[in-house]
Every structure is written in structure tokens, then in C-alpha cells.
Image (spheres, rainbow, N blue to C red):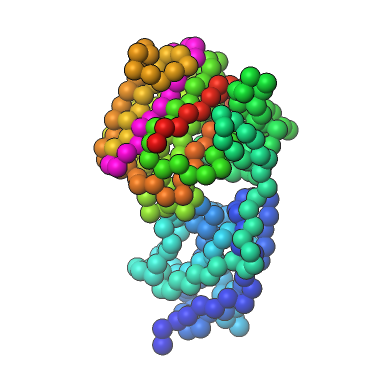
Amino acid sequence: MRPSIEFTKIPPAAQGGREKVDTIAGRVVGARPDQRIVVYARSGPWWVQPWPDQPFIPIKADSSWSTSTHLGFEYAALLVDPGYHPLPTLDLAPVASGAIAVVQIVKGTGTPQLAPTVPVKFSGYDWDVRTIAADRGGLNHLYDGDNAWVDQSGALHIRMKKKGDRWSCAEVVLGRSLGYGTYAMTVRDSSHLEPAAVLSLNTFDQWGGDQNYRELDVEISQWGDAASKHNAQYGVQPFYIPGNVAPFTAPPGTLTHSFHWEPGRVTFRTVRGSSANAKASVVSEHIFTSGVPSPGQERLLLGLYDVASGTSPMQKDSEIVIEKFEYLP
């Protein structure tokens, strides 16, 4: 008889984060003595639970199993053979194959709960400021609602500040998807950023795992390497595929970073000054025609965070001013 998995306790449907955990439990029918359970929760990617270094859940003598889990909108329980090595995250829902004997997926209970955000208006659009922790750049970061604000001139400020022994970062998310078109962001001088700081101007679709989360990136950073000759890059995902990242050097002063997204093609461009018009002095330009996603539920994110660096860790608070955002269909 083919083994099967059932759930006896299902956590709420909620946006993930390290702040909240619950218990997920179930029973297995027909499992072998050497098999175990692995649980994933979906919030954006599928995240192994409760931690990447604690992925295996024993099946008790009465065939029951249980574990703590961070929250997600969906939960997957896998019955796995001894040779299975679970990845920390999955872009797509797990399926039964190889060392995965059975997969059972269930939606979280109740009305889906989204994490609280702080609203802000910038350049004529509604945005949401992140308030819950998230993993970025190999670190788990705090995010505070007061790390982003709009001044009297209409410019958006985002900052990173020390909070205890961790850095509290900023992420501002556009309230809706815009799809194909031209996105332009004017950033005042970013040359003061430390090597481990990252200014990220990117699209992201938490439901778009089948298209690498529809992520298109302009990133200003030396990625923790003070000796790097480049301090910026354009990219499509996955970043590890040759040709999907185009490094360049962003000079001091006000710059306008833009990308024109169309079917099968995205053109990135950085110019000096506060305008993306054709007469502006071009700093860098790159065209991608491979790996370009189609629109879905992606949102534009404006973020400031840091990466792990053994040689050049963050030393002081940092702030970036984004003068304006413009979109042309």
C-alpha cells in the first residue's frame, strides 16, 4: 500500500517571518521505520522548517509527527528516505520523486494574515514600509517602519541603523504591480555607502517562483569587498547563471537608474543627474534578452540592507535619499 500523510493540526495562513511560530502535526500511514518527515512553509519561497539545520522530524511509534514551524500561506509535509538532503528554500512546490516518497500540501487555516506595514506616499504612489524581519545577504535583518520617510521636498529617505547588535534596515514596497514599462529612480549621492551596504532597487513577486520571482535588479554595493573595483550591478535572476549580472561603477553625485522592461528584453541604464532623458550623460547601460520574466504580481522594492562581511562589516548608520520615482507604460 502506498504511504500517505494527513494533517491533524494546521497553523494559520500568514506571512512568514521569524517573529511567530506555531505547531504543525499529523499522522503517516504506511511509513517504513527509516523514513522521516520534512516540513516546508510557503511565504515567498518554500522555507524548510523549523530551521535549515533541523529539518528532520521523527515519526513516533503511534505514527504521529509534529514540529514547530514559522508561518506561511501553505504548508507541505514530505515523507522522505534516508538519502534525502532538504534544501533550505525551494522556488517551486515540492513533488514526490527520488528520495521523496510522498508530498502532502495544505493551505493555512483562516483568512490569510499579512504582516503590518507603515503607509507612505512618494512620487504620487502609495507604498508600504516593511516592519518584520527578513533574510537578506546571508543575514537575518530587522526592519523598522521609521526607517523610511518622505521629507517636505517630496524625497524619500531610507536608512539603516544599529539596534542592539543587529542592523535595522529599510524596505519600501510599491502598493501595486505596474508590469511592462520604464522604471526610473533618481538617487542622491550613494558613494558614502560602506562596502557591506546594499542599496537595492528591484522588482519582486513573492508568488513568482516559477519565474525566479520576476526579479529585475539595480544594486549599489561592493558586497562586503572593499577592494572590489565595481560598486554597482544590473541583474536578472538567477544571478549565478553566466551573463545574468552586469557590474559597473556608479560615480559620486546624483544618478538616475532606470530599466525598460518589455517582452523578452530589459534595458538598464544609469545617467548622471535627475533626469533619464536621452541627453543625459550615460554612466552605464546593459541589455538582457535571456531570463527576462513576464509580468505577474511583482512589486517595486526600494531597500537598504547589509551583507555578511568578515573584512568590512558595517560600522555606522547609513541613509540614502531617493529624489523621485517615475514610471512610463
Residue 123 position within the rendered picture, expressed as x and y whole percent measured from the top left: 56, 29
Q: Which quarter of the picture shows residue 81?
A: bottom left
Tell me if residue 203 is in the magenta stretch. Answer: no
Above/below status of 56 relative to 309: below
Residue 324 position within the rendered picture, expressed as x and y whole percent measured from the top left: 53, 24
Above/below status of 133 relative to 251: below
Q: Which quarter of the picture shows residue 216?
A: top left
Residue for point 47% across, 80% down: 4
Which residue in the rendered view is the most extreme toward the right? 164
Residue 170 position within the rendered picture, expressed as x and y whole percent measured from the top left: 61, 33
Return the residue nearer the eye: 141 or 53: 141
Above/below status of 60 relative to 112: below
Whether residue 199 can be seen here: yes
In this rendering, position of residue 162 left or right of residue 136 = right
What count of labels does the image hold?
Answer: 0
Residue for point 60% across, 53% down: 16
Residue for point 52% across, 44% down: 176
Which residue in the rendered view is the most extreme toward the bottom? 1
Return the residue nearer the eye: 67 or 299: 299
Residue 168 position within the rendered picture, expressed as x and y whole percent measured from the top left: 66, 33
Residue for point 29% across, 30% down: 287
Whether residue 157 can be seen here: no
Quarter of the image with the N terminus is bottom left
In this rendering, position of residue 166 left or right of residue 287 = right
Q: Which residues are magenta?
A: 249-264
Tell me if residue 256 is in the magenta stretch. Answer: yes
